[in-house]
Amino acid sequence: MTPLPDHLRQATRARTQEAENRARAALAELAKAGEPISFTAVARLAGVSTDFLYRSPELRSQIERHRVKGGSASAAPANPPADSSTSAAVRALSARLTLQQQTHREEVAALRKALEVAQGENLDLRRRLARYEAD
């Protein structure tokens, strides 16, 4: 495997550092708000993956320390983050589906209106044709 050029290596380091800073800020924000701290909650708030947090020894130890500080709360959030991430996905898909349904309803309403106009024009043309043929 060929080594990365310096500019790519620097960009990678900068991106990683930025993600770590976001994770630290998210951890501080959760702690300040008194929210349950879990890898999923920090990852969601920071916009990073849970894998990223687990692979970073410093961040991992900070998150685990905060979870231990929570005492009895540390056992409770163990399951809800998975559920909340699942329900977050369900909520996102549900919102998308609702938006699509609304769009389809509007399209159907517009098409029905256009069909009514076309049927009215068709009826008018038939009446004119019937008068023309009667003469």
Image: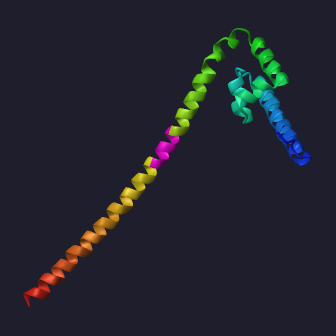
- Whether 99 is among the magenta residues is yes
Horizontal side of residue 37 vs 62, given as left or right: left
**Residue at the location (29% across, 71% down)?**
118
**Where residue 21 appears, x then y in whole percent?**
84, 34
Query: Residue, x 56% and y 34% (percent of image)?
Result: 89
Q: Position of residue 54 (x, y in %)?
A: 76, 23
Name the residue at 87% across, 39% down.
13
Above-or-below relation of 80 to 91: above
Please name whichever residue, 135 or 9, is drawn nearer the observer in this view of the structure: 9
- Residue 3 coordinates in the image, percent (x, y): 87, 41
Q: Nearer the viewer, residue 70 or 23?
A: 23
95 is higher (above) or lower (below) than 111: above
Q: Identify the image quadrant of residue 127.
A: bottom left
The colouring scheme, among rainbow, by chain, secondary structure or one colour, is: rainbow
Residue placed furthest toward the front: 1
Query: Picture quarter containing residue 114?
Result: bottom left
Q: Is residue 28 above or below residue 105?
A: above
Q: Which residues are magenta?
A: 94-100
